[in-house]
Image: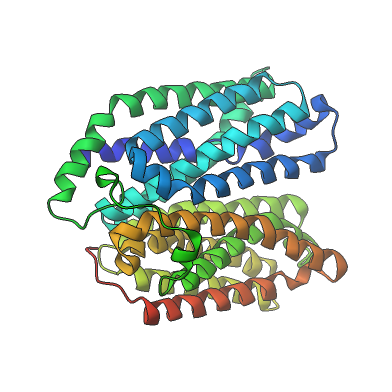
Amino acid sequence: MLQLLLPVIYLAFISLGLPDAVLGAAWPSMHQEFGVPISYAGAVSMIISAGTIVSSLQSDRLTRRWGTGKVTAFSVAITAVSLFGFSMTRSFWLLCAWAVPYGLGAGSVDASINNYVALHYKSRHMSWLHCMWGVGATAGPYVMGWALAGGGQWYDGYRVLGIFQIALTAVLFFTLPLWKENNKSAGQNRDASPEKAGAGKPLTLKEIFGIPGAREILICFLCYSAVEQSVSLWASTYLALARGVAAETAARYAGMFFIGITVGRGISGFLTMEIDDENMIRLGQVLIAAGIACLLIPGPQALALLGLVVIGLGCAPIYPCIIHSTPAHFGADKSQAVIGVQMAFAYIGSCLMPPLFGLAANHITPALLPGYLLALLALMAVMHELLMKRAPGTKRPL
């Protein structure tokens, strides 16, 4: 049963990634139609992120009551309706309103499926799961570009994505019995999961913060997300203004960063067959450090461009391996609560830390980016090592 459900889970994560980069691809057309400044995309993005934070924090409560299958199916249905809402609105304020349910649905899917895979599957599947997100995030802008190039409008692209999400919702509801069978069979040889018969009550934030190692893993996760999003947002600016790279070349290699993450996660899935989660995280940190060194070392432009690709490869194993190791560190009964708060901290890091560097770049210089990334990486590494001391956990199958 576990293997039958796995393609459905992968498909759900492709759908999670599909809309993530579409707003940026469509916004040059959207903001002109809405008659708003181009900077207003940040407001929509912030609303979506706020929704994901709220729903991530509620994931433990929802999963204990309804189970992962139902939470995933209903959440994807909400995102599908939201995407159709995007496609029908011709007002910026209505777009902001539709961004609320979209964020709420996306956060629930993210936290619930991550915990389910961490509990029921080996580490390689977690890496490949996040590789599927990369496939979706890469494909989404192509769908929008296809709609625009074919003589359509931006809302046609959103409508196509909404249709895909509706189809996936039907698949998820049709396969709900598989989730139930998996829970029954898994309960015979695994620790009790939080969704089993709705056992136990949801943990409060105070209780979660009081778990040994929880604060360390939350700060570690925040730092990782801050590194990833800071590179995503500011790499082109750094290359163009601090290293003298042509703008079009800088944009192309900034995109290579995400290709590095996606390809790296595909490779990481195979590496996790021999290397445990903790050492995969350390390997990723070493690669990020090597990539930052390429940015710091004076030399040809190619060295800085290579650095971005290496940073992407280093980011690849960290996110999935932190998630997969959570039940081992904190127990299966607490993992959904901890992962939900981890997701919230990830979005907080994504929302707050890149703009913080933006202030430094604006008032000092964009050349500070490597030092900023190095500081975040150092804090991430320290928190991970403290976690290993305070909540070493138990070895899980590779």
Judged left or right of residue 180, residue 94 is right
Foreground residue among 243 and 110: 110
Could you tell me which quadrant the N terminus lies in? Answer: top left
Q: Total number of numbered labels?
A: 0
Q: Which residue is drawn at 34% across and 66% down?
A: 330
| Residue 358 appearing in the image | yes
Viewer can see residue 235: no
Q: In this view, does 151 lie above or below 106?
A: above
* In the image, farthest residue toward the front: 201
Q: Is residue 310 above or below residue 48?
A: below
Question: Residue at left 55%, top 35%?
Answer: 140
- Give coordinates of residue 175: x percent, y percent: 28, 29
Residue visible at 29% across and 69% down in the picture: 275
Above-or-below relation of 90 to 308: above
Question: Split into 4 quadrants, where in the image is the C terminus?
Answer: bottom left
Residue 194 percent across, percent down from the top left: 31, 51
Residue 182: percent from left, percent from top: 20, 41
**355 relative to 85 in the view: left or right:** right
Residue lying at 75% horizontally and 72% vertically, measured from the top left: 368
> Relative to residue 149, is residue 67 depicted above or below?
below
Observer-nearest of 41 and 391: 391
> Which x, y percent locates residue 94?
72, 26
